[in-house]
Amino acid sequence: MIGTHRLLSEDVKSKKLGLLIIDEEHKFGVSVKDKLKTLKNNVDTLTLTATPIPRTLQFSLMAARDLSVIKTPPPNRQPVDTQLIGFNEETLRDAVSYELQRDGQVYFINNRIENLKDIAGLIQRLVPDARVITGHGQMEGKQLEQNVLDFMEGKYDVLVSTTIVESGVDVPNANTIFINDAQRFGMAD
């Protein structure tokens, strides 16, 4: 059974649940994880996280849970270059232009729906050749899905969106991500 928090609904039943895999553990509260374990008695649980939460880390240090660490990156994995910079149009223009030159794509994450179109317009003005599209959770579902699919298929160079893309949108060609107003995000975000 694969699902979202919907799996915790009273009307969802499972017959032979044997393995529970929790991905991105930091997105689930303690009470939610405990309720997930009650779906079935004696369920083996595998918790995956890139940022272990203190409670889980403490359990593993006390040997109440086993801990495995994957230290070997996937083949051909390039190191991540993280830079903290103030909003700068020149840097934005140069980074988007660089990605266009190497046929790459760019995420621009801005968690305020009110100004997504303004930012998309700014990027379009700074890099006129860039194909820019937006996406957020208040869009009609089919339109949001189409916009994201179009970005994934390379029909657009820049996706300006809210954090809605953090769940399941993997675009190997998107090599650059801008997080606008990063101080407004939590550590897990």
Image (cartoon, rainbow, N blue to C red):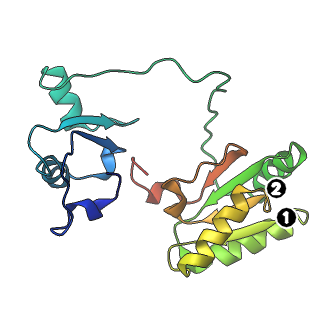
Question: Height in image: 15 above or below 10?
Answer: above
Residue in view at x 64 percent, y 64 percent? 148
The three-letter amino acid code for the residue at tag 1 is Leu
Q: Is residue 148 above or below residue 116?
A: above
Q: Splitting the image into 4 quarters, where does residue 43 fall?
A: top left
For this view, does 152 lie left or right of residue 135?
Answer: right
Residue at image location 43% in from the left, 21% down from the top: 70
Mark 1 — residue?
A: 126
Comparing 119 with 171, the one in front is: 171
Cβ–Cβ under 8 Å for marks 1 and 2: yes
Which labelled disc corresponds to residue 55?
Answer: none
- Image coordinates for residue 106, horizontal then vertical, percent: 72, 53
Residue that numbered label 2 is attached to: 93
- The image position of residue 160, as x and y in percent, is 66, 65
Most distant residue in the front direction: 15
On the rendered structure, is 189 left or right of 90? left
Viewer-proximal residue among 55 and 168: 168
Q: Considering the numbered disc 1 on the image, is that residue within a helix, a strand or a loop?
A: helix
Task: Return the residue nearer the eye: 22 or 14.
Answer: 14
**Could you say where residue 58 lies in the image, as x and y percent from the top left?**
17, 29
Q: Which of 179 and 25 is in front in this view?
A: 25
Q: What residue type is labelled 2?
A: Arg
Total number of numbered discs in the rendering: 2
Q: Is residue 126 found left or right of 11 in the rendered image?
A: right
Who's the residue at 39% across and 53% down the image?
186
**Few, some or many residues within 10 Å of mark 1 (<14, 14–19, 20+):** some
How crowded pointer 2 is (Cα within 10 Å; few <14, some 14-19, many 20+) is rated as some
Q: How far is the residue under mark 1 from the one under mark 2? A: 6 Å
- Which x, y percent locates residue 48? 35, 36
